[in-house]
Amino acid sequence: MANILTTAEAASVLRCTIDNEEMLRLLPQVDAYIKRATGRDWTADPVIAPEAKNAARMLLVLWFENPGMIASGIATLNHGLTAALVQLEAMALNYHTFEGLSGSGYISLPGVKRGDVVASVTGIIGLSGDQSASFETVISLDDHLKQVASDLSGKWFRAHIIPPGDL
């Protein structure tokens, strides 16, 4: 399984070798912490968001330089890292996972609003890759995404929805 940071990226920020045992031990812990803090597994994305990489760098340095911080919790994190995790959590809310319908129609996606942009739809079970052509490109009904393709039942997707103000 890939990590948010590659070993080369981690070694560069820590100024150590890519086979440093402490660094290698910390990388999956950093990923797990960021996943718990934001509610999203950033390692599952085909291209990892730069914001996730930045948060991982900060957390890795903090834990590498002061291992006692590992068990201390979010209350003791520095302001910059806390802000980065809050930003990632907000970004995570723009991703929605859902099952397709047996025909065209509206799929419930609580929180999306009319006018939001459907930046991407990726098949995650039953289909893979870009599936954007099977769905509307702009949300037309609050809390729903319109499927325009025929039978997609039993197939699961992840949509990245962006409010117009965030473009």
Image (cartoon, rainbow, N blue to C red):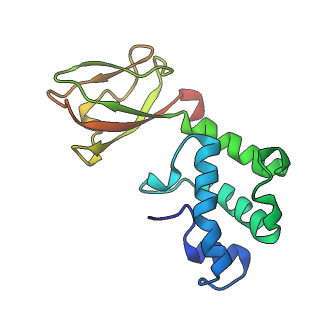
User: Quadrant where the C terminus lies?
Assistant: top right
- Is 16 situated left or right of 133 in this image? right
Rendered location of residue 112, percent (x, y): 48, 22
Q: Is residue 138 above or below residue 48?
A: above
For image coordinates 72% across by 59% down, the residue present is: 59
Rendered location of residue 159, percent (x, y): 40, 36
| Residue situated in front as seen by the camera: 83 or 133 | 83
| Residue situated in front as seen by the camera: 140 or 70 | 70
User: Quadrant where the N terminus lies?
Assistant: bottom left
Rendered location of residue 46, percent (x, y): 41, 56
Residue that sits furthest to the top in the current view: 141
Q: Is residue 144 above or below residue 15?
A: above
For image coordinates 27% across by 40% down, the residue present is: 131
For image coordinates 47% across by 25% down, the residue present is: 116
- Is 143 situated left or right of 152 in this image? right
| Residue situated in front as seen by the camera: 17 or 63 | 63
Rendered location of residue 60, percent (x, y): 70, 65
What is the number of callouts on the image?
Answer: 0
For image coordinates 14% across by 27% down, the residue present is: 150
Q: Quadrant of residue 7?
A: bottom right
| Residue situated in front as seen by the camera: 26 or 100 | 26
